[in-house]
Every structure is written in structure tokens, then in C-alpha cells.
Image (spheres, rainbow, N blue to C red):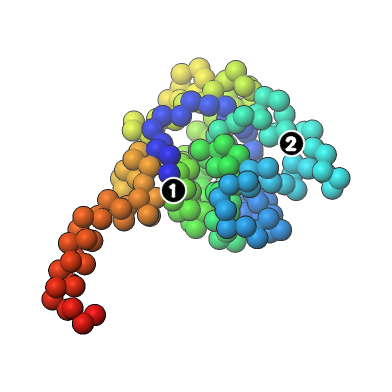
Amino acid sequence: MDKFTTLTGIAAPMPLVNIDTDMIIPKQFLKTIKRSGLGKNLFDEMRYNQDGSEIADFVLNQPAYRNAEIIVAGDNFGCGSSREHAPWALLDFGIRCVISTSFADIFFNNCFKNGILPIVLPQETVDILMQDARKGANARLTVDLEGQTVTTSDGQSFGFEIDPFRKHCLLNGLDDIGLSLEKVAAIDRFEASAAQSRPWV
């Protein structure tokens, strides 16, 4: 998993509330267990017409936001089913951070496990960030995980809270497997001791 330290990037404004996981990655794309390749189907039913052509007014189809790395979203982002494909699709598209007033619990947890930083901020702060994101590609937000701040293109800075353990994992690029590998020496010692004391196992 890639480390998350400081991100300065284009923020796409998505003021819709209750953006659920089926909107993020529709059910017909859940057949794969690969984490790559899902970005092209991110927000599929919002991005494309039935003939496959782009819906021009959808934010990620607009030239200013095609390379967005941050989403500023409405309340209750990631609600619906628990599919981990949702953060996979966001990450494959290039999204490393989502900012909202609230997230569905399972989606929130899955983001951290896949290298995406979900940030919860008050509505008045999200409104300011949303307005800044609407300025387009020339207005970039900066997310500093170490300092726990989000800074607008004109220099307004807002602090956010994050669980210290999750912060540690993102800063060091540690998913569940990475955390286990940090303990590989202790695991090896235990297995050697167990084999010696219980050779019949």
C-alpha cells in the first residue's frame, strides 16, 4: 500500500448526499477480485450514457476534474452495501482522499485499509472546501496527514481528527498484511518454539 503523507491535488466537488457504494461502483462490476481496472467504471451510471458515451456535465468528465485526487462530498458518503470494490475503484481512478461531514462505517474502515484518507469535517468547513473545489483545476487543496490539516487554494487551513493507529498505518503504507509482516520475527520465534515444544503438531 502506498504511503499517504501530504497530498496537493485537484478536488472534485460532489455535493450530493447519500452517495452509496452502488453509485460508486455498480454491482455488475463486482465479479473481479482484482483491485486494478475498476477506475474506468467509477460512478459508471453517473459518468456514462447507455451507449457508453460520456455524460458531459458529470464532474469527473469535465476537463478540470479528470485528474482529481480528492473528492469533496455531501453527507453520508459510502452508504449502502459493504463492497470493498468501492474504495478499490476510487483508488484506481486516482482518488486518495474523500472529505465529507460523515461516512458509512464499513466504507470508512475500508478506505484506511486501501490507502485512502477519509476526512470528517463540520458542514460549514465542507461548504468552504466545496466552494474552493468549484474553482477548477487551478485551485488545489493540500491535505497534510502528519499535521492533520486541509488547506484551500487561498491558504485557509482547517484541522481534522484521525485515530492515531490509522494515521500510523497510512503514513507508513501499512495495510493488514503489512502490519502482520512487521511482526514476522516474533511469528518466526513463536513457530520455532512451538515446533520444539510440540513436535507432534
**Residue 76 appears in the picture as rendered:** no
36 is higher (above) or lower (below) than 192: above
Residue type for callout 2: Phe
| Residue 174 point in image, percent of width and height | 36, 46
Q: Is the residue marked by circle 2 packed among few (<14), some (14-19), or many (20+) residues within 10 Å?
A: some
Task: Identify residue type, mark 1.
Answer: Phe
Work out how far the residue at label 2 is from the one at label 1, CA to CA, in angstroms: 27 Å
Residue 181, x across and y down, in percent? 30, 53
From the image, tell me which residue sits under label 2. Answer: 58
Query: Which is more toward the observer, 35 or 28?
Result: 35
Q: On screen, 186 above or below 128?
A: below
Q: Is mark 1 on a helix, strand or loop?
A: helix
The answer to whether 42 is drawn above or below residue 139 in the figure is below
- Decide if residue 153 is on the left or right side of residue 21: left
Q: Position of residue 120 (x, y in %)?
A: 46, 43
Please name the residue shown 27% across and 51% down the image. Answer: 182
Q: Residue furthest bottom?
A: 200
Q: In which quarter of the image is residue 128?
A: top right
Q: Which mark is residue 188?
A: none
Task: Judge by depth and name the residue closer to the eye, 172 or 166.
Answer: 172
Where the C terminus falls, by quadrant? bottom left
Mark 1 sits on what residue? 112
Report the residue at 79% width, 37% height from top.
Answer: 54
